[in-house]
Image: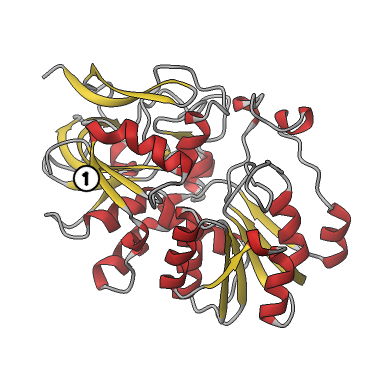
Amino acid sequence: MSTMKAVVYKGAFKVAVEEVPKPTLLHPDDVIVKVTTSCICGSDLHMYEGRTGAEAGIVFGHENMGIVEEVGKGVSLLKQGDRVVMPFNVACGRCLNCEEGRTAFCTVVNPGFAGGAYGYVSMGPYPGGQAQYIRVPYADFNALKLPPGKEHEADFALLADIFPTGWHGVELSGFKPGETIAVFGGGPVGLMAAYSAVIRGASKVFLVDRVPERLAKAKEIGATLVDFSKGDAVDQIIKLNGGMVDRAVDAVGYQAVNDAGSKEIPNAVLTSLIRVTRPCGGLGIPGLYVPKACLPDPGAPDHTSAKGEILLPFGSLFEKGLTLGTGQCNVKKWNRYLRDLIISGRAKPSLVVTHEIGIDKAVEAYDKFDRRVEGYTKVLIHPNEW
């Protein structure tokens, strides 16, 4: 078979399932993986909506797992038939940042930009895995081995991005067990941040959103719900908590909206984080803010934010002595340990999965996920018979 099915970006609000060339080994360190599960991510929607510099023809999909089918001559840790999941980060494992564990900021795989990823604009020449097959470069470094079989498939798929990214968001905030934390955004990453905070021993977890299905999932996790369509989220949290929280996480990013969901306010969540967090507390910001290479943003609400420039109440940040951490998740820092939490039964991140589909249903799934209808929260694609 020289071709395969893949989800291909065609332009704003349009994807198609097309036949594209099947990947081949390009380097001795490569493997080819037959994809069993790929996920639609909220960050895919930024491209889908035409909000980045993405050009038609990109094969989407940065959250991928499957079975090793072909192995390059330089690969020593993997063999044909191994079940693996790949971090969304493509990393070399050899540069300074990789050696220090900062694999999201590899300086080798995508020259001129710190970091690479599958199927994402400006993140390097790595087609995504919403396809029947994917090429994995630096495979010994980039593929995490899993127990054979089909058990925990949906849980393991989330090790590619959202479970580690949610954990990372909590870590960025400086969280310690027993503290209170507010998570803004009830999409998959926000839900995983809330779930991670529960696992890590938060005394109270508040989750802010306005979509009923997302709030219902947050309730399952054990979070206290804050519906920002019913009033200022910060005021609600302070009232419920009896004061400001210790930590806060932005799992929304630059497409934050007003209480009616009708207007974008790019600085809304960042401002709320500063307001809701106690003096000397911490902020974790894993939510996506579009990097310079992806700008300008044609759908931005104003000229300034189209350039990626966002107004912040920095005086309040300074006055309160808040610490702040941001940036993409270094998935390899966490995925092995989170895998073992899943295997031991102590974590089940698949609780956020709402739909599992074959690849031929991908066009419909993108549309519904983008419109937040019919409960579409986290969608898994099975590109091959499963």
* Quarter occupied by residue 174: bottom right
Residue 120 horizontal side relative to residue 360, left or right: right
- Crowding near the residue tagged with mark 1, few <14, some 14–19, many ≥20 C-alpha atoms within 10 Å: few
Task: Kindly identify the residue that appears in the image at 62 percent across and 47 percent down.
Answer: 261
> Residue 254, percent across and down?
64, 42
Residue 137 appears in the picture as rendered: no
Give the image location of residue 339, x and y in percent: 31, 61
Residue 77 vertical position relative to residue 225 in the rendered view, above or below: above
User: What amino acid is found at the position of numbered circle 1 in the picture?
Assistant: Leu
Q: Residue at x 59, y 47 (%)?
A: 327
Q: Residue at x 68, y 72 (%)?
A: 237
Residue occupied by mark 1: 77
| Residue found 49% across the figure and 23% down from its top | 12
Quadrant of the frame with the N terminus: top left
Relative to 278, 19 lies left or right: left
Q: Is residue 373 visible?
A: yes
